[in-house]
Amino acid sequence: MTAYHQMSRQELEKEKSLLDAAYAAFQAKNLKLNMARGKPSVEQSDLSNGMFNCLSSTDYFSEDGVDCRNYGTLDGIPEMKRIFADLLHLSPDEIIVGGNSSLAMMFDNVSSNMSHGVRDGIPWSKQGEVKFLCPSPGYDRHFGICEYFHIQMIPVAMTETGPDMDEVERLVSSDPMIKGIWCVPKYSNPDGIVYSDETVLRMANLKPAASDFRIYWDDAYAIHYLYDKPATILNILRECEKAGNPNMPLIFSSFSKISFAGAGVACIAASRSNIEFIKQRMAMQTIGHDKLNQLRHARFFKDAQGVLDHMAKHAAILRPKFEAVEEALERELAPLQLAHWQNPKGGYFISVYVPEGCAKRVVQLCKEAGVVLTGAGATYPYGNDPHDSNIRVAPSYPSVEELRTAAELFCLCVKLAAAEKILSE
Amino acid sequence: MTAYHQMSRQELEKEKSLLDAAYAAFQAKNLKLNMARGKPSVEQSDLSNGMFNCLSSTDYFSEDGVDCRNYGTLDGIPEMKRIFADLLHLSPDEIIVGGNSSLAMMFDNVSSNMSHGVRDGIPWSKQGEVKFLCPSPGYDRHFGICEYFHIQMIPVAMTETGPDMDEVERLVSSDPMIKGIWCVPKYSNPDGIVYSDETVLRMANLKPAASDFRIYWDDAYAIHYLYDKPATILNILRECEKAGNPNMPLIFSSFSKISFAGAGVACIAASRSNIEFIKQRMAMQTIGHDKLNQLRHARFFKDAQGVLDHMAKHAAILRPKFEAVEEALERELAPLQLAHWQNPKGGYFISVYVPEGCAKRVVQLCKEAGVVLTGAGATYPYGNDPHDSNIRVAPSYPSVEELRTAAELFCLCVKLAAAEKILSE
């Protein structure tokens, strides 16, 4: 029960006229801020400017003596494989280094399984209507891949410890057309949830009806912490091995939010059997990805510890931004019980649940006052938030000052939308 | 009729014992040379070393003000689009700039057409057994893409002016399951053939039985000339427009053999309608390709003229290498009429036709004396050269000295294989 519900109609109308006046004042400021995507700020990009000059006309060899300017090396230079392996607590031969986009690697993997099937499998597209489990709210671009391939998306609720595993187990074990699940196991997009050990264990021990079921484990925020140090979770590949499901997980990660968002390096990690299978396709696709950019990363970061040290600098920039938003939410919305949210310990988003039926209106009000948010519903399959409640706030790009203003506007819009809704009932 | 055929058995046996001795002498040299792939030499890579330091911590904006370090810009920065457009005599809005591999873009386009069809088309894979015309000899990696997607390959003979267009017209107009043709229009792989105006015109004016037929126009060697200046051919997109087939051609090109083979920039060029359609898929695949590498190229080459000037330096390095091989062929094999070949004016290969049934044996003999050539048959669909005659020689990587030795060995092996064959008949 919100405080607004406890007001008389007259009180609420008075409150709304105050809100309207405040909103008009915001509109007069001609704000122009974008909090739609998890885009690193200029200051964060500056952290990696050393990459511009860390190679030279005498330094372009990988440690195995390969001239990185030329053709060759399908699956990545050894030093870059090692960095990914150390960060993901895996072995270098469980890693394929790709181009600059882990999304492209996920898309390509789904495409491959649709047209050719998993190793020793029948093409998914030849088996009937393919379905994926989509823990929701989740990452809109995962859902986009499913839509593109006409894969039916089945939403599964997120809990504070990860996807609702009762539901995941029930569905996966009963329907052989469920071929995949999208997971962002650490600092999930958008809720910032870290999967518990129980969640990872239950995921690894799934008994899928489909022998060609795959877990798409998008470790996008593996080391993207805001406080103290990255959360540690159980190793999905090792747990799947123990459970007799070594080929079930496909792990993706990238440097897009570590080095340069537009010029990072991505990877896929999996069982050696899966790696071998993926490399067969890659050998038809390309002579190899950009090794100079891999070497640039290896020179700049040196090793996994170098990457972790670098992430502390990102955290120092991001933390006050998250806190500026959280402070406004706490101050403006908590007393009125108009919203709830996680205070994430990492990742790129604050996921706010506004009163049912109000998310679209809040996003619209913010937009009309100059602050662009992620479209309401984008965090759900087919853009359909059944409660019209979740809004993903991306605080990384604007300055702290701008965020204070934007967050104040956001809270105002939540109040306004809530008041409008109650008054219209 | 070769000179060897005119010898008596005794004369030929004597000749063969001389060849055997010469071959043994080569084996004693312990050569270790690789002429298998069109790989630029170290000196060629050195030409682009200026790319290592042409960006800096104060220079990372594209001309439209985009911070190339960050996310954004799906289809390429304006300056890189313009360079491609000027080189290909097209408009920037007919260009999508990709990652480092044009092969990856071709693979992805075929994959897209298989699973989703061309714009307003039915997925190729849903129409029956897809077929491609494969002018042969041709590029093994084109054929590899077909094999991967289970596309039936129909060889079409190459002539000195391009594919046998009588055959292409006959096949394309009669079979609606023929969905594509692979073309390398300039300095073709491996023959170095430049398509004549008539060939391009007839290609553009095809009347395919399949409304979703596509010409894969791999302009891999668009400006990769050895003498004077690049050959000019008719503009396939403009000719297709005139013929009422604007959406038929898909043009691919890349900087792999201009800047760095391992870290270049590729593109696809096509009608605006095709570009729009491809971008719809790209928007699901990636946030964008590596813009910093695009900017690096734009800064280093400045404009299309800068690229053409740069190609003159490549030509100066490559020309003596091609000539070293051609001299040996002319000196050793022409008098005996044991082989024929083109003396290409550009590209990366010399395509030698040895006596029927001898190509595999020549490649084997060379290998056993330390010189690796492209596998015999690789230039034909399914690795099947019906005459076992064509050998692709790639002279770019070794030094001129090494090439003289390797070419001498090659000629010796052709003689030896020919002598063996006649003696075994």
Image (cartoon, coloured by chain):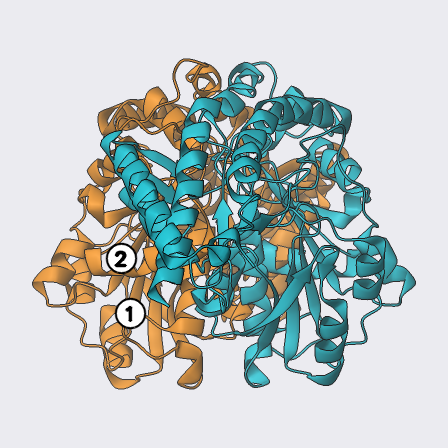
Chain colours: A cyan, B orange
Q: How far apart, in angstroms, are the residues tagged by discs 1 and 2? A: 9 Å
Q: Earlier in the sequence, mark 1 or mark 2?
A: 1
Badge number at residue A123: none
Disc 1: host chain = B
- Between residues B360 and B43, which one lies in front from this camera angle? B43
Q: Which residue is mark 2?
A: B276
- Depth check: give the residue in front, A242 or B340: A242
Residue shown at the point (39%, 85%) measured from the top left: B127
Residue at 61%, 53% (x, y): give it. B362
Whether residue B340 is visible, yes or no, is yes
Q: Is residue B131 above or below residue B57?
A: below
The kind of secondary structure element at disc 2 is helix
Report the residue marked by disc 1: B119
Q: Which quadrant would residue A32 be assigned to in this image?
A: top left
Q: Which residue is nearer to you in this view: A331 or A164? A: A331
Q: Residue at x 23, y 65 (%)?
A: B248
